[in-house]
Amino acid sequence: MEIPSADALSDEGVTVLADSAPEAFVDPDIDGMAAEQAQSAEAALPETGTPDLQESPAEVERADLGQTVPLSSVDREELTALPANAVVTGKYVVQSQLHHSPERNLYRVAPRRQQKCGTCGRLSSIDAANCEHCTAVLQKEAPAEFYLMAESFYPEALIQDPTLMDLRLYHPNLVPVVDFFNYTPFGKTRYYAVAEPRQGVRLSQLSLPRPAMQVFGWALQLADALNYLHTRG
């Protein structure tokens, strides 16, 4: 999963808007237009009542059978982005949206009332004495300033094998997924993967060739990460 780089954002405080998130997508201009159109249509009707409508035999037959006439097309629910300052499961506050595609959204989020486990790197409640994932004793370690949260209707679009979370992989040369869960802010259930950010630059953004000692340093980092993965199964 490629993660686009995040631009610097303001450190201003956030306001909890979890309960009002669905209303944030209501367009008052559209509602006003709909009301005006309804009034115009009502005024155009004759005083004797609504005009007679000609029904086809098929429509009459379906009505007699008590069946609902299906719509000619059913719109698929779009992966509408969460608004800024929305709170997800009470643990993450959306700061901004970094990426959007039909199958996935990517956000910069701030942790809310959580602490970081120094053993597995995952987050637990600020009130917990032991890590909720590896049971290690917590030391009230502050979490990262922000995390990257991916969102999709399909869990496989975020993590191909969710059981990898049980391995508690945590290494400085890996981008660790610290949380994976489902949540329904509105509409269909959505899936979320939260990753701790790592500083770095994509190889595609670098001019080539690079100095030999820099490439050698990259090789050592890759070897160290691969050795860690092999030792963890």
Image (cartoon, rainbow, N blue to C red):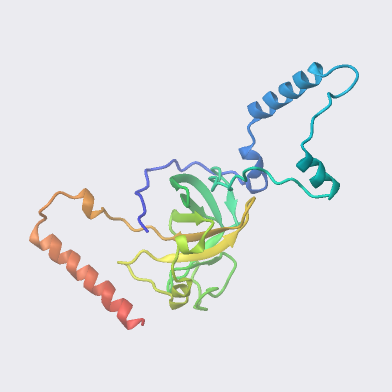
Question: Percent x, y for residue 2?
Answer: 35, 55
- Kindly indicate the quadrant of the structure image that contains residue 38: top right
Question: Percent x, y for residue 62?
Answer: 79, 46
For the point 46% across and 43% down, the residue is: 11
Q: Is residue 156 above or below residue 68?
A: below
Q: Is residue 131 above or below residue 207?
A: below
Q: Nearer the viewer, residue 143 or 25?
A: 25
Q: Nearer the viewer, residue 66 or 217?
A: 66
Question: Percent x, y for residue 193?
Answer: 48, 61
Q: Quadrant of the N terminus?
A: bottom left
Q: Is residue 126 left or right of residue 215?
A: right
Q: Is residue 92 left or right of residue 34?
A: left
Q: Quadrant of the C terminus?
A: bottom left
Question: Percent x, y for residue 152?
Answer: 51, 55
For the point 64% across and 26% down, the residue is: 29
Q: Is residue 162 visible?
A: yes
Q: Is residue 143 visible?
A: no
- Kindly indicate the quadrant of the structure image that contains residue 73: top right
For the point 49% across and 51% down, the residue is: 109
Find the residue positioned furthest to the front.
57
Q: How many marks?
A: 0
Q: Is residue 167 left or right of residue 130?
A: left
- Kindly indicate the quadrant of the structure image that contains residue 223: bottom left
For the point 59% across and 51% down, the residue is: 87
Q: Is residue 7 left or right of residue 27?
A: left
